[in-house]
Amino acid sequence: MLLVAAPRKGSSDVGQLHEHLDELGRLVDTAGAQVVGRVSQQVAKPHPGTLIGEGKVEEIRAMIADLTATLVVFDEELTPVQGSNLERELAVRVMDRAEVILDIFSTRARSHEAKLQVELAQLQYMLPRLTRMWTHLSRIRGGIGLRGPGETQLETDRRMIRKKIQYLRDKLRDVERHRSTIRTGRAPMLSVALVGYTNAGKSSVLRALTGEHDILVEDRLFATLDTLTREVEIGDGLRVRITDTVGFIRKLPHHLVASFRATLEEARESDLLLHIVDASREDWEAQAHVVDEVLESLGLADRPVLLVLNKTDALADPEAFEARIRELHPGSILTTTMRTDGVTPLKTALRERARSSRPMVRVRIPLSDGAGLAALYRMGDVVDRQEVDGCLEVTLRVEPWQAEQLAERGTLTT
């Protein structure tokens, strides 16, 4: 497989060209192919027919022959016309980054929901590119007896795909309603969603917080796609609900983002987003910026975010890095899942958030009111109880709406 990058001259992609090709190589490796070469060209203006210039097309054709490559992958998204022209000129299959990511998702999806989402994204990507699949029956290459059937079959396929897309959208709306029903029935507690660049360590953080070693952790891009939710004990009798969401990546196909909206509703409904960042990467700030952009596109820019810099065990100079982070991002958390106490600072931060989201109240009831005392234990977390002036004074943490109810009843003490 041959990798090709064609960033616009003067764009930020030019300065990160090698990093982007390295990432594309990792995507290709995850998809199960082997990279045999790479080539790049800065383009002042993308060629409408082939993206790159004619001379570079000739160079790539020669490299394909020398390296016996059978596939060419572009880091930039190709239009249907560009993909068709390049395949004709290079005489091998041509893919772009978006298509590779969709292929990875199709093999990684495990749950019924994830498979629906990936299939929808694939069909939306495929629909405008069907002509490439039917060049052997097209009018351009056609002759007597080939014009009608080709066009008819192409239109038939388009209609079938449009119907399937609508069917999948309806099914995913059902999934979204089902998730909403599940959220309504959950016990009230602080809800947290893990977001971040793919392979930043979200699943590792969730496993470290829960202690569940059966949670899949793998050093590959998009190792996990399925949303996983766990209730986690964080100390002092407090629990939080944490959801691991799908990872983001640069140039994430917009069809894929749209398809995963049902899953990402968990992030939208959460009280707090934990933005997990791989601190061991030199380009961690660029990756963090990509995640911020995707969150904004999903309408999540207004959600409270706690920056968590993970994999600090792999830093060359942890102390210097921490000093820089404290200056740039005060309030952020540094973690590692390679030590038993590596997520302790994160648990401490979550406890503070949980306490602030659940006010502490004091309720005074008669000593003989056993039913009232039992109701308080069911309502919240009882922290303390003691006799005061012949009554029982109970200190507990409750939800804000419960505190309002107790205030209306006149049972709260000052």
Image: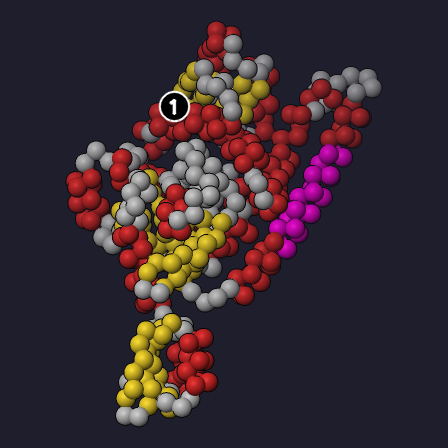
Q: Residue at x 58, y 62 (%)?
A: 181
Please tell me in which quadrant of the rendered image residue 119 appears: top right
The segment highlighted magenta reads 155-174
Pinpoint residue 386: horizontal percent, then vertical percent.
29, 83
Q: Residue furthest bottom?
A: 390
Mark 1 neighbour class, 10 Å CA radius: few under 14, some 14 to 19, many 20 or more: some
Q: Residue furthest right?
A: 145
**Residue occupied by mark 1:** 42
Q: Is residue 351 above or below residue 202?
A: below
Queried whether the magenta region covers residue 163, the answer comes back as: yes
Pinpoint residue 360: horizontal percent, then vertical percent.
32, 75
Count of numbered tags: 1
Q: Is residue 338 above or below residue 403?
A: above
Q: Residue at x 43, y 33 (%)?
A: 220
Pinpoint residue 29: horizontal percent, then vertical percent.
47, 25
Queried whether the magenta region covers residue 143, the answer comes back as: no
